[in-house]
Each structure stands twice: as C-alpha cells, then as structure tokens.
Image (cartoon, rainbow, N blue to C red):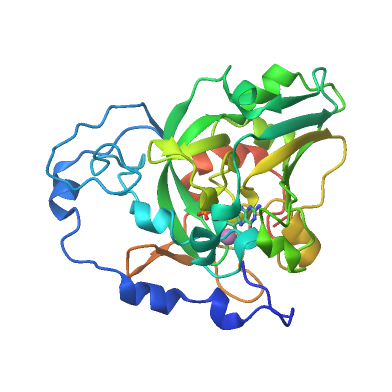
Amino acid sequence: MLIRGPADVNPSEITPYATYLNRRHFIGRSAMAAVAAAAVPGALVACGTDSASGQVQVGPGQDRDWSKTKSEIGEELTPYEDVTGYNNFYEFGTGKGDPSRNAGTLEPRPWSIAVEGHVANPAVYDLEDFIAPHRIEERVYRLRCVEAWSMVIPWRGFPLADLIRRVEPTSRARYLEFVTLLDPRQMPGQRRRILDWPYVEGLRLDEAMNPLTLLATGLYGRDLPNQNGAPLRLVVPWKYGFKSIKSIVKIRFLEEQPLNTWQQMLPSEYGFFANVNPEVDHPRWSQARERRLGEFRRRPTLMFNGYADQVASMYTGLDLTKYF
Ligand SMILES: Nc1nc2c(c(=O)[nH]1)N[C@H]1C(S)=C(S)[C@@H](COP(=O)(O)O)O[C@H]1N2
Ligand SMILES: [Mo]
C-alpha cells in the first residue's frame, strides 16, 4: 500500500523496490527443475505429493524440497526468503523489510479468536480449539499486492467456508468483518497513527463462502511466521493483498457492509471489493502489469488474479469500475 500525505511516512520507505531487486540473484535458480517438473493440476496441493530430489538446498523454514511444487498454472513458488522478508504489515512498520525485522514482539500463542454477530454459535475460542476441527490443506496461490508486485505462496490452512458452516450464520448475516489484534505493546507500529487501528477487512458472505477463500495458519509447510500474520490470517487470492488481513482476533457476521481500513483511509483509491483487475487502474498507477518477486520482467496482471473461472460469476452485473 502507498500512502501519500501523512508526514511521518517517508516515501523512500515505501518504494524500496529497486534496492530490493539489486539484492536478488537470478542466475540458474531452478532452471532444470522448471523444465523437468510438470504443473500440478488444480489449485490444491495435497500434503507430501512433491517428491524430494535431494539435490536442492533446504532453506530455513523448509522441511522438505519445494522446488517441484508449482501453482495450478505451472508457476514456480516465490522463494521463502522473499515470502517472509518482503512484507506489508503496517503494525510493524511501513517498509517492506520492517515486518521481518520487527515482528518478533508479536506473541501468537496463547491467542484467542472471537466469533460474533449474526451466528447461532457465537464464541471466543482458543486458537487450538478454533483450528482443531478443521482439515488442514496446502494450497499454492498467487498474492497480488495493489502496489503491483506479486508472489506465489504455498499456504497451509482451511477453507473459511468450513468455519462459517460450523458457527451457523443466521439469515441476517450478509457480510463478514475481520479485525486484527490491537496491542501497541506487541505491535509497535500501532503507536503511530498511520492507520486507524485496528486493521479491519470485510467480505460479502458469498465471497467468504467461496472455496478459494482460506483461513491460513501456515506457509511453506510450517506455522505462519509473525511477519506473515501469525497465528491466523485470511487469504483471498482473487483480491488485492490488502484484503488478506493478518493476525485476526475477531470475526463478526453483519447485516451491513463493513468499512475496511484502506477504504476508510482513501476511499477514492481503495474500495470494498478490491478484485484484481488489470482493466481498472489505481488512480495513481496502472494495474495492467506486475512484478513477480524474484523476476525482472513485468508480467501482465490476470483478471481476478487468474481465478476468474472460480469467482467471476459472483460479480455478474456489477460495474467493476464503480465497485472497485
Ligand atoms: N493487519 C494487517 N494485515 C495486512 C496488512 C497490514 O498492514 N496489516 N497488509 C496487507 C497487504 S497491503 C498485503 S499486500 C498483504 C501482504 O501479505 P504478506 O506480507 O504475507 O505477503 O497483507 C495484508 N494484510
Ligand atoms: Mo498490498
């Protein structure tokens, strides 16, 4: 996300991309593997299906060889160091390297999650009880930030739809609101009024029920690193990254559409839907192309981030230039 205006945000902090590119190494990585590996069909990658070659160095946070794991259209995973070292998590600073540096103060355990509003079963859960009834899956998704960079990430988690069925929304529930932890002691960025804390996001009930929508508990086969939103975050792969709210402590079922943080901050630039759309530019830059972390060339951005088959029908008849 980019903010222009608040005097305490240094623009050089929020566009360190050139610096970042200079640090990258590009030669030879996985070239052989890319040729040899077939694309994994479907978005779902079952645990343990990729075979370990023994040839590839297993890095920090990686218990097995991920080099053969691809997205459903054959894309290579973004390296672990990028997924966990180049982040947006303003609770820990506005620079892309700030979350990995500063998120050590977050205490993801013990953790509780409140489910409130129009549900038959409102409750406050311990994290373990919240997760335990669900079947954990691994799924490779593209994450496309509104700032026009993207990653391919092997998430671990469970469909939000499974949780929704479990808590039984009433007929009045039409939207979900998600709320991040508010604790300036654990989240030092909240001591500055960069955003109106806590960070809030929302989905329409049908979007929340879509089988692609994930409550993520991990990535690269392990629990979420703090900087990626430990211990629980949303992943909505056809929407800009800011919808994928991190470190969730509350889920509310509402009748009315909630006001998400970025829409509240800059309503002319960020809407409620935030569907990835190469044809609807951000007021200050094009959304037609994107930089995949680890690559120089810019790729064309795909409608609904490449998930149109699975989500476009939810928006038929909606003017996407108006409901951006
Ligand atoms: N609570 C909270 N959630 C957040 C953000 C944030 O600043 N605070 N940033 C969002 C944005 S803009 C993006 S692009 C993604 C980045 O996720 P990643 O760092 O795991 O790649 O997190 C989203 N979730
Ligand atoms: Mo973002």
Q: Is residue 28 above or below residue 128?
A: below
Residue at point 46%, 62% (across, down): 86
Residue 167 place in picture, x, y as percent? 74, 20
Task: Report if residue 192 is visible in the image.
Answer: yes
Residue 98 place in picture, x, y as percent? 53, 66
Residue 152 place in picture, x, y as percent? 40, 50
Quadrant location, the C terminus? bottom right
Task: Report if residue 322 is visible in the image.
Answer: no
Q: Is residue 150 above or below residue 56?
A: below
Ligand 1, seen in the image, is in the quarter at bottom right
Number of marks drawn? 0
Quadrant location, the N terminus? bottom right
Residue nearer the viewer, 189 or 46: 189
Quarter of the figure with residue 108: top right
Residue at point 78%, 65% (across, down): 265
Residue nearer the viewer, 260 or 221: 221
Image-based side of 230 in relation to 32, left or right: right
Image-based side of 260 in relation to 126, left or right: right
Residue at point 74%, 65% (across, down): 191
Q: Is residue 76 above or below residue 3?
A: above
Residue nearer the viewer, 3 or 240: 3
Residue 111 place in picture, x, y as percent? 66, 35
Q: Is residue 170 above or below residue 56?
A: above
